Image (cartoon, rainbow, N blue to C red):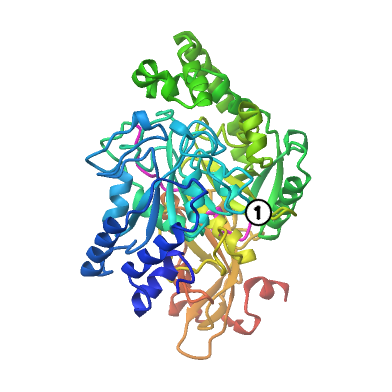
Amino acid sequence: MIISLTIPALHAAYRDGSLTPTALIEELLARSARYPDHAIWITPPERARLLDRARELEAHGMDDLPLYGVPFAIKDNIDLAGVPTTCACPDYAYTPQQSATVVQKLLDAGAIAMGKTNLDQFATGLNGTRSPYGACRNAFNPDYISGGSSSGSAVAVALGLASFSLGTDTAGSGRVPAAFNNLVGLKATCGLISTHGVVPACRSLDVVSIFSLSAPDAQQVFAVALGEDAADAYSRAALPHGFDFGRAAQFRFGVPARKDLQFFGDAESERLFDAAVERLKRLGGEAVEIDFAPFMDTARLLYGGPWVAERYQAIRAFVDAKPEALFPVTREITLGGAKPLAADAFAAQYRLRDLQRQCAPVWDVVDCIVTPTAGTIYTRAEMLAEPLARNTDLGLYTNFMNLLDYAAIAVPAGFRADGLPLGITLFAPAHQDVPLLHLADLWQDDRALPCGAVETEPPVKPVSPVVAIPSGQVRVAVVGAHLSGLPLNGQLTSRGARLLRATRTAPHYKFYALPDGKRPGLIRVVSGGASIACEVWELPATAFGSFVAGIPAPLGIGSVQLEDGSSVAGFICEGIGIEGAKDITALAGWKAYLQT
């Protein structure tokens, strides 16, 4: 019996022989058959193809395949070789000979492509009802919307039909369905995951998104999927992310001013969001109220400005020739893109630059911002009664993200009284994907609750977490005058260093007050040592050399082991330096010594 589809759990079962890819496929085929009315698949799992893939993997073995035997679903605007791509429009369908770059990377890593999932036609919508293949149903209550446009991709993971899935996200399509189905939804920095082989919605803004059961799973998939691609003109290389606020004991997060928050009369959503803010504080965050108006003004540009012309351009020849082939609401939105003039596009670009400038200062005072992923959730009947107005509501907190070039991750925030999940979104500037993933991991660890709708246990943690992108930072342990509040701390802060955490060394050190009375000396010993109070700071690697150059003998930088067993760069003392020094090991810290 399969207990969990999280990646570490699957790999543990494969290694101990309690599970094989073939057995997994048989189980998932049986599971998929239980949901005939949920409108999850456009091309459903096909037994013969999947069993061939399972046997291929079993013959190869797990070595060198980081996603060995991990099942995933693919939104049906992303190419899978030999399988039709429809974009939820039967008349548009074509069968690609090659898989999209991101899909091929995942297959090369050992993943198993289960099938192609339903979506709001041509990825136009945030609700999951705009498809001739049926309105995709929420994993918790089929009377409610699943969220979209990556509807089937989210529901497939939530109902235990895949470990993760690919969606796309132009205006929130990789985050809203995550919120409505109790999942993690990663919208990475624009361009880090190739969109070659993806039918565009707005090519200049599109992102391939990842739905998963845990933040570490999302990071493992992200590590495989990312990479600059010469075939994608909008692709770009990942940059070091700098200070890892997701691993810091203290961080600053922005919260929209209460006047800017809208929950559309949903008191339960408001309650969950307020509780999430308090929880972030408990996890070490300092809440900073921000003016959210320029972000909301940016969001209005996406559909209220000429960017809708990009949707029209993406399928221009097809929609001009066969407008009747489109879902009515999709046709109305898409053909609206034929109206803006080139002058309108330039005016909107100027307005966007102004708004980018207005939003930028907030990043001088916060590391990330938290918002609801969506202010509320609607029934399918409510959605269909007012499709444009309700869809606009759903995009309030998501539509600005790619226009402003931000990275974002949606995480579960809890359940309403009626049992429906809702989520929050954490976002930050481009290339902050890894700190966001780490903060999401901390968030999930705090409550240790299962994700999706059928998992019964909290996500299994990987033994060795994947490092998707280098930080470009150096961590250094300080034990003396560089501690917070002491005279030399400015040598760190002036170089852009940030405190990660206060901790202690492993119990293997002697600690001395050097003869000048101003500095301590830390020396590792075989026996008779103690655990010494220290702080771990993180500073840019480019500043580390000048910092080290200013350290006078007999002190220097070596490797210091911390109480959790990890090692970082840190202050150590040459043995000759303790001649005439005072042994203060019993005080276990420099600040304790200074107080004496």
222, above or below 54, in the image: above
Q: Which residues are magenta?
A: 234-250
Residue 580 in magenta stretch: no
Classify residue 224 as left or right of residue 590.
left
Q: Position of residue 62 (x, y in %)?
A: 28, 69
Q: Position of residue 478 (x, y in %)?
A: 54, 66
Which secondary structure, mark 1?
A: strand
Residue beneath disc 1: 413
Residue 239 in magenta stretch: yes
Q: Judge whether residue 109 can be spotted in this image.
A: no
Q: Judge whether residue 492 can be spotted in this image.
A: yes
Residue that appears at 33% across and 64% down? 69
369, above or below 545, in the image: above
Q: Position of residue 66 (x, y in %)?
A: 33, 62
Q: Residues within 10 Å of mark 1 (few under 14, many from 20)?
A: many
Classify residue 96 as left or right of residue 310.
left
Residue 278 or 139: which is nearer the viewer?
139
Q: Main secondary structure of the magenta part?
A: loop
- Quadrant position of the C terminus in the picture: bottom right
Residue that appears at 58% across and 36% down? 398
Res 75 quadrant in image? top left
- Quadrant position of the N terminus in the picture: bottom left
Residue that appears at 33% across and 33% down? 93
Classify residue 325 as left or right of residue 348.
left
Q: Given the image, on which type of amino acid does mark 1 rest?
A: Ala
